[in-house]
Amino acid sequence: MTTERVNPPELSPPTGFSHAVVAAGSRVVFLAGQTALDGDGKVVGDTLPEQFERALGNLLTALRAAGGTPADLARVTVYATDVAAYREHAGQLGRLWRDAAGRDYPAMAVVEVVRLWDRQALVELDGFAVLP
């Protein structure tokens, strides 16, 4: 797969995301929304950073099982029940992302939602990847 991250100078410099990702490959992997569920189906973590780390880990586990790597991610959407809290923890969430997925950022969006499927869930991530 080849990817090109496009960040036009006319747009605000991206922090923790890319404005556009051009991907060419032979397989597209659509990743279901992942929250902070453990192997028994229970939400773990009381804080947004704890749940984000687990949800991201779950997303990357699904991606790896499909044969991909974090660098293959083309798009990720983050659904948060409190965007103000997400912004408050943005620095820590960015570090968690870089530790788990590196610095090849996909195109991303953060969307505030009233609630998620599991009432205890504070954050959910979904996305898609393009594999060679």
Image: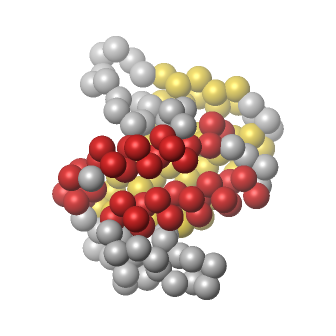
Q: Is residue 82 visible?
A: yes
Query: What is the quadrant of the N terminus in the image?
Result: top right
Question: What's the residue at 74%, 40% (across, down)?
Answer: 131
Query: What is the quadrant of the C terminus in the image?
Result: top right
Q: Quadrant of residue 82?
A: bottom left
Q: Position of residue 22 (x, y in %)?
A: 59, 28
Vertical position of residue 44 compared to residue 95: above or below: below
Left or right, 36 with reference to 16: right
Question: What's the residue at 64%, 31% (across, down)?
Answer: 23
Q: In the rendered view, how is the structure colored?
A: secondary structure
Q: Position of residue 16 (x, y in %)?
A: 39, 37
Left or right, 130 with reference to 42: right
Left or right, 97 with reference to 86: right
Q: Quadrant of residue 48?
A: bottom left
Q: Is residue 75 visible?
A: no
Q: Position of residue 113 (x, y in %)?
A: 31, 67
**Camera-nearest residue between 90 and 23:** 90
Question: What's the residue at 49%, 69% (across, down)?
Answer: 35
**Camera-nearest residue between 24 and 87:** 87
Vertical position of residue 74 compared to residue 21: above or below: below
Q: Position of residue 72 (x, y in %)?
A: 66, 39
**Camera-nearest residue between 92 and 67:** 92
Question: What's the residue at 61%, 85% (across, down)?
Answer: 40
